[in-house]
């Protein structure tokens, strides 16, 4: 079994400093968006997907587990948040919590089931589980089937921040994204993250060293699923709807694509990938199904010639981990 | 009771498709170590090739049954030669990602030209009409699909388990380097195996064309169910794939009769149950 990323460099204090500098640059650039004339809705959408892709990357890039059903966490959290906001009329912060809790519960169950098989089977199981959920949501009354939950009130966060104002909403989403990103960064560089990487590199050896690898993988799955749920809950405020597209397998495929383009197992890769793919969809929206064809082509090109992804290639060139 | 038998028949037909598709997946996985995500798209191509042959070339169903698997099989072999073979030695996941990309391309192209609605494909004259079996009315074409699929599945099993070619194939699955040392052209065998698996998918596509209509996305959802079938049955045994495929089709048919709301989900629920009780799958070896 060859490793997913062929060059894992030790995280030295210097590398960590570089990463923190890059993080600050990213945060400042993103914070400047409302003053730049860039359409904030586009950036907010991209940020939600970036967080989703980062959560997905935690599992594939550091745990070596390719989930082909990550849309189920996003969609579930989206539906539950939307329901809590619209029907129960909860304030935004509680609505987000409801979504996160739902994704947490779902990842406990699906993680328990899917972690039982490895490699390719794991991918097929997560895909099948997300399809199971898709059909449940298609029939469940509270999701309103094909229509989805629409016209979700955005409300006031903590009673102060008026989320109906685009700029306020933008900064709330940005803070949410940065918090999620830092949490993932912390997880990756924790002792837990190191064990996870060792499992990715050589699971039998990790077992022989006394680690209960199943527990580590399960915890990584739950963390990843819950964070994906956070992204889904944030997206409800941006899109103001929750629909079946968010639980469909094609959405799971898009998340995989974003991470692959940016670079599997890189810290900033999923963010770059999410912006690239969302921008592409935006610009090519008029071309109908050719978008699917282009996405498929990117998959093929990435796998055949560009397996490290954008950030992975840059990091490889500079011999850094990014 | 009539309705029950009718649903059982539908179940058997779906089971035939599950069996043909999961059989192809298992054969391909054995040789190439790749889960062929493009299987559903190639199944769809089989149906479309039959449609083109009839409407553009005036070539009837019977020839399509032979030609479509060959044409799509050749397309598959080109894919293997130009792309899949470069994945040797890489993590399994890249094969899944690459074939997923291929599936998106193929489905996207067909969707552009044919939309998402279905194109009709007429049942051939010889198989029109039905038979009264006493306890139920059996449309001849549906009976034909079940029996023909079963014959093809068993023939594939025979080819792989009982012939000299199959013995080479199984040997190359176990240890390709050693088989090469005996002077057998393993890369060519890999290409042919992929062609065979893809051909089976295309054959299932032709069989389903008169029943399910010809649609660009006809394989997209089917392949996910087939993945669940593969997880349940395991890919270790050819006969296992065949039996699991038919059995799950029948269970799905029964569900349609007794509790129709769950008919979409029953295969996935069964997959969960199997994973909880016997994580390696019913016939599978550890992956």
Image (spheres, helix red, strand yellow):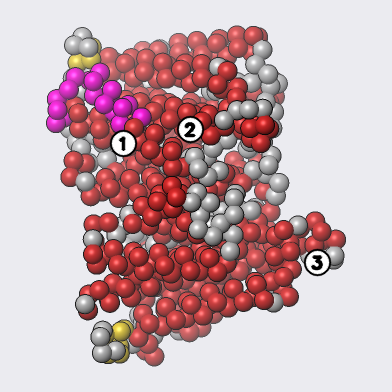
**According to the image, label 1 marks what residue?**
A76
Q: Which mark is residue B250?
A: none
The chain holding disc 3 is: B
Q: Is there one chain holding both mark 3 and mark 2?
A: no
| Left or right side of B121 for A236 | left
**According to the image, label 2 marks what residue?**
A218
Q: Residues within 10 Å of mark 2 (few under 14, many from 20)?
A: many
The chain holding disc 2 is: A
Please state which of residues A173 and B147 is positioned toward the viewer in this rendering. Answer: B147
User: Looking at the image, is B27 positioned above or below residue A151?
Assistant: below
User: Looking at the image, is A308 positioned above or below residue B4?
Assistant: above
Q: Residues within 10 Å of mark 3 (few under 14, many from 20)?
A: some
| Left or right side of B70 for A167 | left
Q: Residues within 10 Å of mark 1 (few under 14, many from 20)?
A: many
User: Looking at the image, is A177 positioned above or below residue A118?
Assistant: above
Residue at disc 2, secondary structure: helix
| Left or right side of A103 for A311 | right
Give the percent coordinates (x, y) of residue B76. Answer: 59, 63
Give the percent coordinates (x, y) of residue A296. Answer: 51, 47
Residue at disc 1, secondary structure: helix
Which stretch appears magenta? A86-104
Give the percent coordinates (x, y) of residue B38. Answer: 52, 56
Give the percent coordinates (x, y) of residue B77. Answer: 64, 63
Q: Is there one chain holding both mark 1 and mark 3?
A: no
Please state which of residues A321 and A119 is positioned toward the viewer in this rendering. Answer: A119
**According to the image, label 3 marks what residue?**
B184
Viewer can see residue A76: yes
């Amino acid at each position: 079994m060859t490793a997913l990323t062929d060059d894992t460099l030790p995280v030295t204090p210097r590398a960590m400093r570089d990463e923190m500098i890059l993080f600050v640059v990213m945060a400042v650039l993103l914070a400047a968006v409302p003053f730049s004339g860039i359409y904030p809705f586009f950036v907010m959408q991209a940020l939600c997907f970036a967080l989703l892709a980062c959560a997905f990357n935690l599992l594939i890039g550091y745990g070596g587990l390719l989930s082909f059903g990550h849309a189920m966490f996003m969609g579930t959290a989206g539906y539950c948040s939307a329901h809590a906001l619209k029907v129960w009329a909860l304030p935004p912060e509680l609505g987000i919590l409801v979504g996160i809790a739902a994704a947490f519960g779902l990842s406990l169950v699906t993680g328990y089931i899917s972690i039982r098989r490895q490699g390719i089977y794991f991918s097929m199981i997560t895909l099948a589980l997300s399809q199971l959920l898709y059909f449940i949501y298609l029939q469940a009354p509270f999701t309103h089937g094909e229509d989805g939950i629409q016209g979700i009130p955005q409300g006031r966060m903590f009673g102060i921040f008026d989320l109906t104002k685009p700029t306020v909403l933008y900064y709330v989403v940005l803070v949410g994204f940065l918090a999620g990103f830092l949490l993932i960064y912390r997880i990756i560089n924790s002792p837990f993250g190191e064990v996870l990487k060792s499992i990715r590199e050589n699971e039998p050896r990790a077992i022989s060293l006394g680690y209960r690898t199943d527990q580590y993988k399960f915890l990584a799955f739950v963390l990843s699923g819950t964070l994906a749920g956070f992204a889904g809950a944030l997206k409800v405020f941006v899109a103001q709807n929750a629909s079946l597209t968010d639980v469909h397998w094609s959405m799971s495929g898009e998340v995989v694509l974003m991470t692959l383009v940016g670079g599997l197992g890189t810290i900033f890769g999923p963010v770059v990938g999410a912006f690239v793919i969302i921008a592409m969809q935006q610009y090519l929206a008029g071309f109908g199904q050719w978008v699917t064809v282009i996405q498929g082509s990117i998959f093929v090109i990435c796998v055949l010639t560009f397996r490290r992804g954008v950030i992975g290639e840059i990091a490889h060139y500079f011999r850094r981990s990014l | 009771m009539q309705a029950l038998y009718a649903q059982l028949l539908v179940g058997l037909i779906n089971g035939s498709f599950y069996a043909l598709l999961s059989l192809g997946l298992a054969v391909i996985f054995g040789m190439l170590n790749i889960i062929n995500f493009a299987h559903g798209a190639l199944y769809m191509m089989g149906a479309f090739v039959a449609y083109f042959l009839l409407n553009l070339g005036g070539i009837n169903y019977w020839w399509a049954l032979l030609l479509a698997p060959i044409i799509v099989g050749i397309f598959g072999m080109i894919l293997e030669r130009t792309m899949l073979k470069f994945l040797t030695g890489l993590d399994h996941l890249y094969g899944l990602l690459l074939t997923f990309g291929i599936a998106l391309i193929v489905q996207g192209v067909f969707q552009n030209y044919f939309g998402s609605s279905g194109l009709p494909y007429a049942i051939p004259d010889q198989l029109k009409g039905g038979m009264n079996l006493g306890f139920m009315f059996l449309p001849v074409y549906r009976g034909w699909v079940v029996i023909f699929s079963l014959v093809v599945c068993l023939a594939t099993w025979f080819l792989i388990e009982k012939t000299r070619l199959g013995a080479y194939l199984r040997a190359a699955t176990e240890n390709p380097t050693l088989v090469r040392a005996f002077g057998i052209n393993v890369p060519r065998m890999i290409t042919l195996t992929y062609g065979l698996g893809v051909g089976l998918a295309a054959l299932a596509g032709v069989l389903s064309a008169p029943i399910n209509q010809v649609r660009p996305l006809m394989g997209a959802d089917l392949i996910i169910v087939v993945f669940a079938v593969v997880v349940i049955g395991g890919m270790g045994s050819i006969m296992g794939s065949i039996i699991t495929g038919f059995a799950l089709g029948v269970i799905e048919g029964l569900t349609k009769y007794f509790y129709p709301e769950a008919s979409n989900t029953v295969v996935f629920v069964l997959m969960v149950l199997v994973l909880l009780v016997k994580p390696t799958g019913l016939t599978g070896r550890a992956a």
